[in-house]
Image (cartoon, helix red, strand yellow):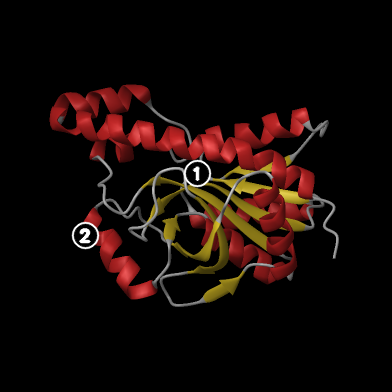
């Protein structure tokens, strides 16, 4: 099966910009990409709109949190399934995933293949991450992929999940980072600074998270052209 048009759903505006930049380099004038914020219901809704606009397959693209302790910041995940907290399993498209895996390997990217957990709240500390890994054996967690999976299942279209680890299993997410994210997938710098003034002990964690997120974004920047070229 040859997929001619992919629709991308991201959680952060910065992730959408990576797709847009890769599309410009590939000569694609208007890539089908939308930012849902860290919200599964919005991800499902925006994925449906992409399908209505002509997308033939969906891609959940962006950063994720590591659950498998073996994963480090920047590790690329090519999920074979999305799990939700109710225990439902949504398999990603085998053919689409296989072609993408080969293309990534040829581009010197080596994705980890395994299930990813869709959560409605951030797994913010190491205790939560360890509990989720034990319960689900999912290698990573994000807050949009299960919405994309539900939209794909409802429409009967293939979908793919490509995510890069930002916060690994062994690190907490500072509260200041959670406060700084907007519902639209942006970052409120002022809110982050205000949170750090109230919780200065979060500064070291914020700096580590920023470095880890940069590693994840570098991986996504390399992977985005592979996805667009493979469609």
Q: Residue at x 27, y 63 (%)?
A: 130
- In percent of width and height, residue 117 lies at 45, 64
Residue 127, numbered label? 2
On the picture, is 137 further left or further right than 177?
right
Picture mark count: 2
In terms of depth relative to the viewer, which is nearer, 217 or 175? 217
SS type, badge 2: helix
- In percent of width and height, residue 114 lies at 51, 66
Instruction: Classify 141 as above or below 27.
Output: below
For the residue carrying disc 1, how many other residues have a C-alpha within 10 Å: few (<14), some (14-19), or many (20+)?
many
Q: Residue at x 34, y 67 (%)?
A: 133
On the picture, is 143 further left or further right than 80?
left
Residue 71, numbered label? none
Instruction: Classify 214 as above or below 44.
Output: above
- In percent of width and height, residue 142 lies at 45, 54
In terms of depth relative to the viewer, which is nearer, 120 or 64? 64
> Is there a contact, CB below 8 Å, between mark 2 and mark 1?
no
SS type, badge 1: loop
Quadrant of the rendering where the N terminus is positioned? bottom right
Task: Using the rendered image of the protein, determine whether residue 200 is visible from the camera's viewpoint.
Answer: yes
The quarter of the displayed image where residue 23 is located: top right
Task: Using the rendered image of the protein, determine whether residue 184 is visible from the camera's viewpoint.
Answer: no
In terms of depth relative to the viewer, which is nearer, 108 or 182? 108
The quarter of the displayed image where residue 71 is located: bottom left
- Residue at which label 1 appears: 37
The quarter of the displayed image where residue 213 is located: top left
What separation in Å lies between label 2 and label 1 (alpha carbons)?
A: 25 Å
For the residue carrying disc 2, how many other residues have a C-alpha within 10 Å: few (<14), some (14-19), or many (20+)?
few
- Say which label, 2 or 1, has the lower sequence index: 1
- The label nearer to you, 2 versus 1, is 2
- In percent of width and height, residue 14 lies at 54, 32
């Amino acid at each position: 099966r040859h997929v001619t048009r992919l629709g991308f759903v991201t959680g952060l505006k910065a992730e959408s910009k990576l797709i847009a930049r890769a599309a410009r380099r590939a000569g694609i004038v208007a890539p089908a990409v939308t930012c849902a914020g860290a919200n599964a219901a919005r991800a499902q809704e925006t994925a449906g709109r992409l399908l209505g606009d002509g997308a033939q397959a969906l891609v959940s693209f962006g950063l994720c949190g590591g659950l498998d302790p073996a994963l480090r910041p920047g590790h690329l995940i090519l999920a074979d399934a999305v799990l939700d907290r109710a225990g439902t399993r949504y398999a990603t498209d085998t053919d689409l995933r296989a072609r993408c895996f080969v293309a990534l390997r040829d581009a010197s990217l080596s994705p980890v293949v395994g299930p990813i957990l869709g959560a409605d709240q951030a797994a913010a500390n190491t205790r939560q991450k360890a509990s989720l890994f034990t319960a689900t054996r999912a290698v990573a967690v994000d807050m949009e992929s299960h919405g994309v999976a539900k939209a794909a299942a409802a429409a009967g279209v293939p979908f793919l999940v490509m995510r890069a680890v930002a916060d690994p299993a062994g690190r907490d997410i500072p509260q200041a980072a959670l406060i700084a994210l907007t519902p639209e997938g942006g970052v409120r710098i002022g809110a982050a600074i205000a949170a750090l003034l109230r919780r200065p002990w979060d500064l070291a964690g914020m700096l580590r998270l920023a470095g880890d997120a940069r590693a994840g974004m570098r991986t996504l920047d390399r992977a985005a052209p592979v996805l667009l070229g493979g469609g």
